[in-house]
Image (cartoon, rainbow, N blue to C red):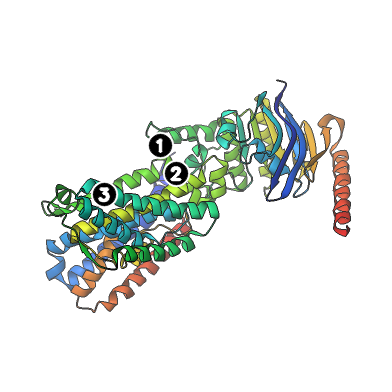
């Protein structure tokens, strides 16, 4: 078991559209991997398969060496295997309080399913101070999510993942729609995940934001892995040029397909 | 530190602002009734009468509060009330068994709720369309099987009559059931895992799904819950009137919805108030009596009811926006 997640020849289609066409993808232990690619390249589908939201049609997936049965794999199963996902915009429910959002899907309850609200609030308070680093100004456990800023929301979602001791934190566009200051905070979180010996996968359009914290980059285009680069092998500029090559290629192929 | 604590206290207070507004509105309307017709509203009898009639609106309004909290709607409940009432009546008439009649009747509510929930979640038909269709379908079905004729049910000789609609001193039993179910629903919605899932689905279905909530299952259960509450209203109506009639439930549609909306539950989902529904059921349920007792014609009831809905929903929204 040398890889945390290993995907071999994964296929997935929705209503006749093939989103993934034989993806091979690996995530090592204590590794930060960036998934790059255009809209519709299949990035979101890939992470939704790892996090148990969608099941794959064909291929093999192993998590910590265990072969995954796509029929039985679910968000709950992913959680229990230490995989946490933070979705951009969809990570938290706006009208609910912070403490409810932290424990959604993993509530602390008694045998009858009634919530232990006191304990959930205490734990949330701890998370806010120890993990998120909120210093009590304006935000408390009873705060409604829509009153938080974009960066605070991402902070809450990532802290939730860290609190549940995830071995792998998956981030969908972690820096989109954030101010520069907030982006820095999010990068700090990613660094903290790595410092704790955990792994992280993220999708991003803005490679400049996430380049400093990444170990490896994987480029995806039209449902296939088209390139894999190590952080130490190329600079940000070189990575950018590589990606432009693929984007251009992809545009040309699209145009060719349209003509045909 | 003191500053922070005061801030939180203020925050906590503002969270209940719209509820406090509702209490003040209800109280002032009752005070108004007391002023306009003291001979009626300063005596206990009218309140006893409310306690016996309001629970029927209340049961269904509580069920509807769950449906609305989930961001859906159910329009089929008045017909379910009639169907369940008929099934209760006919089963009791043929078998003379209260338990069997109760089981069959509640089962009919469960089945309708299951069909509603499945059509909404599996086929993806909007709940307003599914339940509107079911409203007609079930009303038609109960008319067909009953031949459109009213039936009497001689349940008043059974012990269950005392349990469901008897009197505990001056208090009608159904109002005690209503209070009990309100408390249970409050805990179910705000203190139980299930209720939390309902609120999250209403707020953001995708978030709920991504966090592992079984959206389809929860939705179907909530539609079933609504069906069962409508069944209960149908059964208790049969008990109270000792009769089943084919138009049973028809007047309840708007009143039930009004109770949920005036109570502070929004159609957008994700937010609900069980206490608000409870209080608003009494407010809506007592309007007609108050208006008639004040000497106005019954035509005013709808006018004032409509006014109340618009005013209270406006207030709820403005209070939330301010927060």
Secondary structure under tag 2 reads helix
- Find disc 2 in the rendering and name its residue: B196
Quick one: B72 or A186, which is closer to the camera? Answer: B72
Query: What separation in Å lies between label 1 and label 3 (alpha carbons)?
Result: 32 Å
The image shows residue A127, relative to residue B90, as above or below, that is above
* Residue A154 horizontal/vertical position (percent): 61, 42
Callout 2–callout 3 Cβ contact below 8 Å: no
Q: Which mark is residue A115?
A: 1
Circle 2 crowding by C-alpha within 10 Å: few under 14, some 14–19, many from 20: many
Label 3 near label 1: C-beta < 8 Å? no
Q: Mark 1: which secondary structure?
A: loop
Residue found at x 14% / y 69%: B40
Residue of label 3: B102
* Tally of numbered discs: 3
Tag nearer the camera, 2 or 3: 3
Judge from the rendering whether residue B233 lies leftward or rightward of residue A170; answer left or right. left
* Residues marked 1 and 2, same chain: no
Left or right: B48 as drawn, with respect to A62: left
Camera sees residue B277: no
Vertical placement of residue A172 versus B305, above or below: above
């Amino acid at each position: 078991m040398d890889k945390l997640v290993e995907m071999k020849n994964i296929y997935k289609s929705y209503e006749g559209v093939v989103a993934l066409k034989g993806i091979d993808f690996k995530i090592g232990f204590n590794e930060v991997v960036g998934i790059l690619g255009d809209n519709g390249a299949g990035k979101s589908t890939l992470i939704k398969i790892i996090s148990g939201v969608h099941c794959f049609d064909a291929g093999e997936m192993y998590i910590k060496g265990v072969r995954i049965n796509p029929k039985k794999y679910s968000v709950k199963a992913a959680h229990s295997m230490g995989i946490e996902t933070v979705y951009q915009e969809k990570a938290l429910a706006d009208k609910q309080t912070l403490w409810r959002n932290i424990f959604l899907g993993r509530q602390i309850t008694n045998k009858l399913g009634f919530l232990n609200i006191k304990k959930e609030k205490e734990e949330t308070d701890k998370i806010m101070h120890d993990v998120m680093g909120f210093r009590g100004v304006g935000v408390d456990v009873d705060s409604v999510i829509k009153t938080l800023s974009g960066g605070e929301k991402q902070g809450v979602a990532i802290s939730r993942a860290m609190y549940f001791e995830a071995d792998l934190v998956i981030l969908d566009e972690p820096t989109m729609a954030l101010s520069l200051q907030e982006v820095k905070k999010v990068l700090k979180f990613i660094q903290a995940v790595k410092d704790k010996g955990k792994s992280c996968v993220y999708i991003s359009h803005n490679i400049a934001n996430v380049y400093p914290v990444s170990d490896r980059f994987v480029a995806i285009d039209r449902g296939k892995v088209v390139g894999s680069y190590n952080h130490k092998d190329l600079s940000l500029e070189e990575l950018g040029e590589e990606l432009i090559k693929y984007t251009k290629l992809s545009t040309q192929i699209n145009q060719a397909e349209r003509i045909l | 530190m003191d500053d922070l604590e005061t801030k939180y206290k203020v925050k906590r207070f503002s969270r209940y602002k719209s509820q406090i507004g509702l209490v003040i509105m209800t109280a002032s309307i009752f005070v108004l009734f007391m002023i306009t017709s003291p001979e009626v509203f300063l005596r206990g009898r009218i309140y006893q009468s409310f306690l016996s009639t309001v629970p029927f609106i209340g049961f269904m309004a509580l069920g509807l509060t769950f449906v609305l909290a989930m961001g859906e709607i159910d329009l089929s409940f008045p017909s379910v009330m009639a169907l369940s009432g008929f099934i209760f009546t006919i089963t009791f008439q043929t078998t003379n068994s209260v338990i069997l009649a109760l089981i069959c009747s509640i089962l009919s509510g469960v089945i309708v709720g299951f069909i509603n929930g499945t059509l909404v979640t599996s086929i993806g038909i909007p709940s307003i369309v599914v339940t509107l269709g079911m409203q007609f379908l079930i009303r038609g079905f109960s008319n067909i099987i009953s031949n459109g004729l009213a039936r009497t049910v001689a349940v008043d000789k059974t012990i269950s009559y005392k349990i469901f609609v008897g009197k505990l001193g001056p208090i009608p039993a159904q109002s005690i059931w209503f209070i009990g179910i309100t408390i249970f629903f409050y805990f179910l919605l705000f203190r139980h895992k299930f209720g939390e899932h309902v609120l999250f689905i209403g707020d953001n279905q995708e978030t709920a799904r991504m966090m592992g909530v079984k959206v389809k299952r929860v939705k179907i259960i909530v539609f079933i819950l609504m069906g069962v509450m409508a069944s209960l209203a149908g059964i208790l109506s049969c008990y109270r009137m000792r009769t089943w009639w084919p138009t049973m439930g028809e007047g309840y549609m708007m009143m039930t919805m009004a109770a949920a909306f005036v109570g502070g539950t929004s159609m957008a989902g994700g937010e609900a108030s069980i206490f608000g529904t409870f209080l608003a059921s009494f407010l809506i349920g007592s309007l007609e009596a108050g208006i008639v007792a004040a000497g106005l014609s019954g035509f005013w009831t709808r006018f004032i009811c409509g006014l109340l809905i618009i005013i209270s929903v406006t207030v709820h929204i403005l209070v939330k926006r301010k927060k």
